[in-house]
Image (cartoon, rainbow, N blue to C red):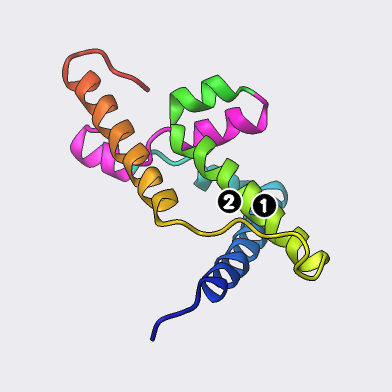
Amino acid sequence: MKQTAKAVEQTLYRLGMAAALFAAAVVILAKIFPPFAAFLGWPCPFRALTGLYCPGCGGTRAFSALLAGRVLESLKWHPFVVYGLGLYVIFMGSWTLNYLTRGRFPGLKYRAWYTWGGVALVIGNWAVKNILLLCGRGFL
């Protein structure tokens, strides 16, 4: 069954809202239940098993740096975080305006290259960090 472009964007918007609610729940849970916050700081199992960085290594530090306004540091830790959060904010903001204005403001159209750009960032980041690690110039 082929979905129309508008149906895809509506589904992405709903998923984005669910992601925002999930993130808020995690933050609230971490604030009121300290053992849960400690769980969020556990070391990466992929790194522990292989000695290599996983494709997501640095993401938590990148997100923390970005929330503190340190964009360049965030890019250093994991460029996908800046890319993904930026795209998320633009997409969700434009579609929220679309709903509030009853379609008079166009929402950002989904393009496959948004996804492929993110995949390329994750793979490139992972490759560079592991090449530096294997050359004795660890990154994290």
Q: Which residue is mark 1?
A: 33
Q: Is residue 76 above or below residue 31?
A: above
How many marks do you count on the picture? 2
Residue 14, position as x, y percentages in the image: 62, 69
Could you tell whether 33 is left or right of 56 in the image?
Answer: right
Quadrant housing the N terminus: bottom left
Q: Is residue 44 magenta?
A: no
Q: Residue at x 38, y 36 (%)?
A: 57
Tell me, for residue 36, which label it has, or none: 2
Q: CA distance from mark 2 to mark 1?
A: 6 Å
Residues in magenta, as a range:
45-69
- Tell me the crowding category of disc 1: few under 14, some 14 to 19, or many 20 or more residues within 10 angstroms, Cα based: few
Residue 124, position as x, y percentages in the image: 29, 33
**Label pair 2/1, CB-CB below 8 angstroms:** yes
Residue 44, position as x, y percentages in the image: 35, 41
Mark 2 element type? helix
